[in-house]
Amino acid sequence: MKRTGSRCGGYIGQAWLVLAMALLFGAVLAGAHIALQPRIDENKLDETYGQVPHLVRVAIGETGRFLSADRSRTETWETPGGKIAYKAFAADGRHLGWVIKAVGDGFADKIELLIGLDKRAEIITGLYVLAQKETPGLGNKIAGRKWKGKVWADQFTGRRTDVPLEETKAVPTKANQIEAITGATISSNSVCGIVNNAVGEFRDKMGTLKKKD
Amino acid sequence: MAKDGPTPLERFINGILPENPVYRQLLGMCPTLAVTGNMKAAMTMSGAVLFVLFCANIITSLIRHLLKPHLRILVFTLTIATFVTIADRFLAAYMYEMSKELGPYIPLIIVNCVIICRCEVCASKQGVIAAGADAIGQSIGFALALASIASVREILGEGSWFAMRVMPEAWPAWAIMILPPGAFITLGLLLGGANWFGMSRSAKTAA
């Protein structure tokens, strides 16, 4: 008993500094989170609202000029499970489509997506990668114009939502196939999976959506 | 009184050129190659490294008498990770676009060898003033190295510097300079130039 006690004391004697610093730094990080997170969330929200017009652009076609990043033309709706969906309107009040927010596991960290859908959620009208921390030079090609000189995510535009999307390492031959990024199959597959899950869930729960104040 | 290492002024000056982290110690190569496609990204990374290195060096120096030799790396990492997280969140809050451009490279400062090296070599052995001077000197040296590489890449690759046009409109932007091969080519040439300059100065001094 005595030996156990002295061993325990020995461990604490060795590690007390690490424990004290972990507590102190934990408190500092909690303070930083409280101070900075609202602004970070606001930045993400600004980016989301800024992307809404682009993500429903196929739905609005040539009348795209009627839509802007004006928040008053976008309503926020919520599924019973707490998932967020943005309802986009034209200037004349027509419902143009939906933009749903989806999160899932990538190769390195969570991937956050904005998925544009037509008003019946039958066709994907755009995909935007809101946040990712995939491998630089490989998986991070899911965002930006770094894949064969194009935006990799643009492949999703125009795809139907009634058939799950699947990634392929070759040139796509079927309507539901998405060409994977060479060397980043897991990241590509993750995005397809996140889109399939989010769109499937949204279609199932469209009738139960509630407008968020 | 025995001298316990270089003076704060020596630490400061050494970090800029004689012990430049990139051109002399070949440390911090990951951000050096990855974020030098343009000056804005390079300078943001340099600012983040300055903040993290300065804070980590000061904390390490303050607790240097309490450090257990076998736990010191753990303490360094804990300290560095804390300040990197603060820098990452700060950029996401106040420089959102740049935070997105730099992506995972800000969190990767945690494993930047420059910082852990300075904690080990200087901050864990010397006082707060020397540790602070060392952090500032090394950070300036790191910033100069990143700026030199980013300047070459941005000017040749995009015809601009800090996003301002500096080359004639007719300049055929060398896309390769913005791509990873451009980073390796530029670093190799500048490293060779720095070595040649150092060797020729040594030869002159010896003569």
Image: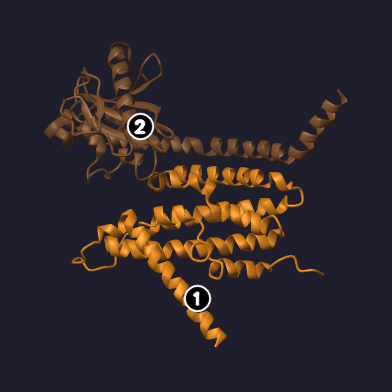
Residue B187 seen in this snapshot: yes
| Residue at the farthest bottom position | B207
Residue picked out by circle 2? A186
Q: Which mark is residue B198?
A: 1
Task: Between residue A179 and residue B158, name the one nearer to us.
Answer: A179
Chain whose colour in the figure is orange? B
Q: Position of residue A147 (x, y in %)?
A: 26, 43
The residue at 53%/80% (across/down) is B202
Query: In which chain is the residue bearing label 2?
Result: A
2 and 1 marks in contact (CB < 8 Å): no
The residue at 48%/80% (across/down) is B200
Q: Helix, strand, or loop for circle 1? A: helix
Q: Position of residue A112 (x, y in %)?
A: 37, 31
Residue A129 position (above or below residue B190): above
Q: Position of residue B1 (x, y in %)?
A: 82, 70
Looking at the rendering, which quadrant does residue A158 occupy?
top left
Task: Between residue A208 and residue B86, name the one nearer to us.
Answer: B86
Tag 2 and tag 1 share a subunit:
no
Label 2 environment density (alpha carbons within 10 Å; few <14, some 14–19, many ≥20): some
Residue A48 seen in this snapshot: no
Residue B95 position (above or below residue A61): below
Chain whose colour in the figure is brown? A
